[in-house]
Amino acid sequence: MADPSSDRPAPSVLLDQAGVAAVVEDLAQRIAPHVDDETVAVVLLTGGLWFAADLTRALARQDRHLRFDALWLASYGDGKESKGRIEVRAPLQRSVEGRKVLILDDVFDTGLSLAESVRLVREAGAAEVLTAVFARKPWPLPRAPEPDFVGWEAPNRFLVGYGLDHGGAWRGLPDICTLD
Ligand SMILES: O=P(O)(O)OC[C@H]1O[C@H](OP(=O)(O)OP(=O)(O)O)[C@H](O)[C@@H]1O
Ligand code: HPA
């Protein structure tokens, strides 16, 4: 998979694409009773895009046709550790005043990105905020808020694929892999 002439390590698969698809379908079934066509799905860019694309289509198959918006947040840059502060690169494009919002992200790690997005969406006037992440990584301390819906409990490894990157690379891998 890796270019043998490069010094990039080859990703090894932790959850293959069939496993990813099963996790998304299961999440859609669990989320569907809690959302309707007036709910706004808010994806956290950039990494959440692949999950949000799949989940919104899985919800459509459950006859839930959510509105869609995005918040562009960044905290990792090209490194493997959170910088501990969240940069807002682009705000919501439409009003969420009085609406139910479903925030979608690829991974819950320190929990800072999700917490900041919940704060921003509440500040924008959302009536109710639900959160769903594809993967949750283990953490020794309590993180607040925990996501309302979690697809897959990931091991404590650095993940790439299905939106997750290292320095902008590997987001397009259909499997979830690790570089460790
Ligand atoms: O729980 P946390 O420790 O905050 O980590 C999770 C966040 O980290 C990644 O975003 P990143 O800041 O790397 O930006 P990206 O979406 O462009 O990859 C990922 O997409 C999540 O949004
Ligand atoms: O394991 C990870 N991989 C890529 N991006 C991330 N952002 C938080 N955790 C991760």
Image (cartoon, helix red, strand yellow):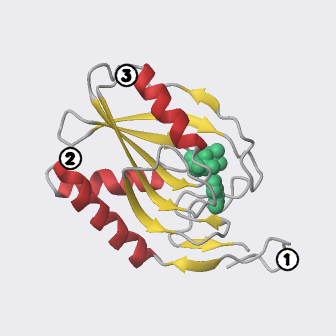
- Residue beneath disc 2: 34
Question: Which mark is on residue 96?
Answer: none
Please tell me which of labels 2 and 1 falls first in the chain: 1
Cα distance between the residues tagged 1 and 3: 46 Å
Task: Name which residue type carries label 1.
Answer: Ser
Mark 1 packing: few (<14 Cα in 10 Å), some, or many (20+)?
few
On the question of residue 71 being in view, the answer is no
Cα distance between the residues tagged 3 and 2: 22 Å
Relative placement, left or right, of 126 versus 31 is right
Please tell me which of labels 3 and 2 falls first in the chain: 2
Which corner quadrant of the image does residue 13 belong to? bottom right
At a point 65% along the width and 73% down the height, the residue shown is 178
Q: Relative to the observer, which residue lies in front, 157 or 43?
A: 157
At a point 45% along the width and 35% down the height, the residue shown is 70
Above or below residue 94? Residue 25 is: below
- Residue beneath disc 1: 5
Some atom of ligand 1 lies within 8 Å of the CB belonging to the residue at label 3: no
Which corner quadrant of the image does residue 155 belong to? bottom right
Some atom of ligand 2 lies within 8 Å of the CB belonging to the residue at label 1: no
Q: Nearer the viewer, mark 2 or mark 1?
A: 2
Q: Relative to the observer, which residue lies in front, 45 or 147?
A: 147
Relative placement, left or right, of 132 versus 157 is left
Q: Where residue 96 appears, x then y in whole percent?
A: 33, 23
Q: Relative to the observer, which residue lies in front, 131 or 54?
A: 131
Q: Where residue 24 appears, x then y in whole percent?
A: 34, 64
Relative placement, left or right, of 152 versus 107 is left
Mark 2 packing: few (<14 Cα in 10 Å), some, or many (20+)?
few
Q: Are marks 2 and 1 in contact (CB under 8 Å)?
A: no
- Residue beneath disc 3: 94
| Quadrant of the image containing the N terminus | bottom right
